[in-house]
C-alpha cells in the first residue's frame, strides 16, 4: 500500500506499476487498488480469527464483483446492507449462505430478494422487520436464520467511548428498557425464523477495544437472560466492525491478530462469568481490510497562492470521489508522485473542482513549493468509503477503480461517461 510515500519523493509504484504510468493509461482522478495487499489483509483477518470464527467483510466500504471473487477465494464472508450490494455479492459468486443482510429499513423487495437467494443471516433491526421477514419467509416456505441487532449503550469514538443510558440513534433494538429481550420473545414465537445469535456494532475508526469490552459484556448478559428465560443458548455473537486504520502517521491501529486475541479473550471471559458455552464469534471489518489497499491519483490543474495564508492546490476530483473530508473532517495525507522535488515544503490545501468551499480533499498538507499544473498527487488510504460514497455532484463523472497485481493493471470499475449521466436523464 502507498503509506510510506513522502512528499516530493519522486516516482511511486503500487503492485509493481508506477502511478504516473497508470495515470497516463487510465486518466485521473483514478483509484488504484492493490489486489495483493487486499488479499493479504483478508488472510490476516481470516487467520487471526481462525476456524471457530467468521470474518464478514463489510461491503459498504467498497464492493465490486472482482472484490467479491477475492473475498470468496480468501475464505471471508460478506456483509451487505442493500439490494444493490446483495446483487453485486451474488453476481460476484459469493455463496449466499456466506452473506449477511443488514439495514435499519430494508424494503420488502430487498428482504424477498435475500430470502429467495438463501442468504445465511438477516440481521433484524426493528419490531416491524421481525413480522415482515417472518411473513416473507413463510410465504416462500423458508426458515430464515436471523440475528437480532442490539444497541448496547456504548458510543465508540476514535480513542474513547461514552456509555450512554439511552441510545439516541436509528439502529438496532435497545438492551436498556428491554426492547431487545422483547424482540427475542417475538422472534422465538415465529416458526419461519431461526434465531441464531445477537449482533452489536458500536461504531467506526476505533483504536482501542474498551468499547468492544462493554459491548461483549452486555451482549453476553442478554445471552444469559435468554438462557434463563427460554432455556436456550444462542450459538452466535457478532461484534460488528469498526477497527481503525492509519490515515495519518499519528494513527496507530492494532494488527488483526491482536484484535482477534483480545476479542476472543473478552468473549470467553464474559461467557465463563455467565456460565455459558462460548458462542461462535463473528466480526465485520470493512475499512480495516480495504482502506489501506487503495490510493487516489489526481492531476493538479490550478495552484493559487494566498500570501500569508496558504496555497490552494486544485485537483481534478474532490468531494465527488472523497466526501469524507467534507463530511467528517477526515484527515488524509498527500504526496507528489510524478517527479522528485527538492523545493521547500509549503503549507497547502488540496481542494477539488466542485462549486463550494467545503470541497476539500486534504485540509493541511506540506507539498513542495514548485507544485505546478500537470503534477500528479496521490492520496493514500482511500480504499474505504471513497469510491463507495462517490457521487455525481456537479454532474461529475465518478472515477474508475483499477486493480493492480504482479505488474498488471485491470479496470474493475470503469470511468463514468457523460452518456452514463445522460442515460438517466429521460425528461
Ligand atoms: N458492520 C456494520 C453493521 C456497520 O454498520 C459497519 C459500518 C461495519 C460493519 C463496517 O465498519 P468499518 O469496519 O468499515 O468501520 N462512511 C463512514 C463509515 C460508516 C460506517 C457505517 N457502518 C466513513 O466514511 O468513515
Image: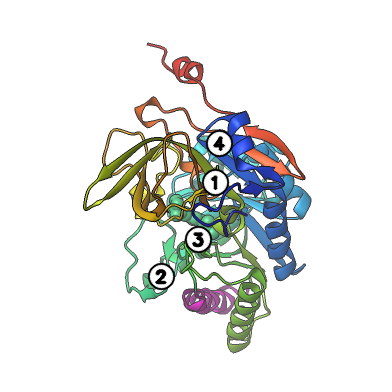
**Residue 28 position in % (x across, y down):** 52, 33
Q: CA distance from mark 4 to mark 2?
A: 33 Å
Element marked by disc 2: helix
Q: CA distance from mark 2 to mark 1?
A: 55 Å
Q: Nearer the viewer, mark 3 or mark 1?
A: 1
Element marked by disc 4: helix
Q: CA distance from mark 4 to mark 1?
A: 35 Å
In magenta stretch: residue 415: no
Which quarter of the picture shows residue 233? bottom right
Q: Nearer the viewer, mark 3 or mark 4?
A: 4
Query: To which residue does mark 4 refer?
Result: 84
By secondary structure, the bulk of the magenta-drawn segment is best described as helix
Is the residue under label 1 in contact with that under label 4 (CB below 8 Å)? Answer: no
**Residue 274 position in % (x across, y down):** 58, 85
Query: To which residue does mark 1 refer?
Result: 337
Query: To which residue does mark 2 refer?
Result: 178
Q: How many marks?
A: 4
Q: CA distance from mark 3 to mark 2?
A: 13 Å
Element marked by disc 1: loop
Q: Earlier in the sequence, mark 3 or mark 4?
A: 4
Mark 4 packing: few (<14 Cα in 10 Å), some, or many (20+)? few
**Residue 13 position in % (x across, y down):** 65, 47
Which quarter of the picture shows residue 280? bottom right
Query: To which residue does mark 3 refer?
Result: 149
Q: Earlier in the sequence, mark 2 or mark 1?
A: 2
Beta carbon at label 1 within 8 Å of ligand 1? no
Image quarter where the C terminus lies is: top left
Is the residue under label 4 in contact with that under label 3 (CB below 8 Å)? Answer: no
Magenta stretch in the rendered image: 208-232
Amino acid at each position: 500500500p502507498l503509506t510510506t510515500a513522502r512528499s516530493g519523493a519522486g516516482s511511486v509504484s503500487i503492485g509493481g506499476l508506477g502511478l504516473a504510468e497508470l495515470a497516463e493509461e487510465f486518466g485521473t482522478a483514478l483509484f488504484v487498488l492493490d489486489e495483493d495487499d487486499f488479499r493479504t489483509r483478508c488472510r490476516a483477518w481470516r487467520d487471526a480469527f481462525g476456524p471457530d470464527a467468521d470474518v464478514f467483510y463489510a461491503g459498504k466500504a467498497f464492493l465490486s464483483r472482482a472484490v467479491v471473487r477475492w473475498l470468496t477465494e480468501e475464505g471471508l464472508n460478506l456483509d451487505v446492507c442493500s439490494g444493490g450490494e446483495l446483487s453485486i455479492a451474488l453476481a460476484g459468486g459469493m455463496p449466499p449462505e456466506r452473506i449477511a443482510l443488514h439495514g435499519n429499513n430494508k424494503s420488502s423487495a430487498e428482504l424477498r430478494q435475500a430470502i429467495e437467494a438463501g442468504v445465511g443471516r438477516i440481521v433484524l433491526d426493528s419490531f416491524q422487520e421481525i413480522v415482515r421477514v417472518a411473513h416473507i419467509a413463510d410465504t416462500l416456505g423458508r426458515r430464515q436464520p436471523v440475528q437480532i441487532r442490539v444497541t448496547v449503550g456504548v458510543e465508540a469514538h476514535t480513542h474513547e467511548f461514552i456509555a450512554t443510558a439511552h441510545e439516541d440513534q436509528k439502529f438496532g433494538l435497545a438492551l436498556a428498557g428491554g426492547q431487545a429481550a422483547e424482540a427475542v420473545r417475538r422472534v422465538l414465537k415465529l416458526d419461519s425464523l431461526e434465531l441464531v445469535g445477537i449482533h452489536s456494532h458500536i461504531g467506526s475508526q476505533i483504536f482501542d477495544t474498551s468499547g468492544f469490552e462493554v459491548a461483549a459484556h452486555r451482549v453476553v448478559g442478554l445471552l444469559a437472560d435468554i438462557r434463563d428465560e427460554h432455556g436456550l443458548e444462542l450459538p452466535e455473537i457478532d461484534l460488528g466492525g469498526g477497527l481503525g486504520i492509519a490515515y495519518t502517521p499519528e494513527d496507530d491501529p492494532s494488527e488483526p491478530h491482536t484484535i482477534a486475541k483480545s476479542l476472543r479473550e473478552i468473549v470467553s471471559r464474559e461467557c465463563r462469568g455467565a456460565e455459558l458455552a462460548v458462542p461462535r464469534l463473528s466480526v465485520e471489518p470493512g475499512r480495516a481490510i480495504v482502506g489501506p489497499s487503495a490510493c487516489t491519483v489526481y492531476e493538479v490543474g490550478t495552484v493559487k497562492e494566498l500570501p500569508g495564508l496558504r496555497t490552494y492546490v486544485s485537483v481534478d476530483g474532490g468531494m465527488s470521489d472523497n466526501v469524507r473530508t467534507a463530511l467528517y473532517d477526515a484527515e488524509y495525507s498527500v504526496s507528489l508522485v510524478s517527479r522528485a522535488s527538492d523545493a521547500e515544503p509549503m503549507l497547502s490545501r488540496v481542494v477539488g473542482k466542485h462549486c463550494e468551499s467545503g470541497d476539500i480533499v486534504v485540509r493541511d498538507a506540506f507539498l513542495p513549493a514548485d507544485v505546478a499544473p500537470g503534477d500528479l498527487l496521490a492520496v493514500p488510504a482511500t480504499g474505504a468509503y471513497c469510491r463507495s460514497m462517490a457521487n455525481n455532484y456537479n454532474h461529475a463523472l465518478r472515477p474508475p477503480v483499477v486493480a493492480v497485481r504482479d505488474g498488471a493493471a485491470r479496470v474493475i470499475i470503469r470511468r463514468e461517461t457523460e452518456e452514463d449521466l445522460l442515460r438517466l436523464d429521460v425528461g
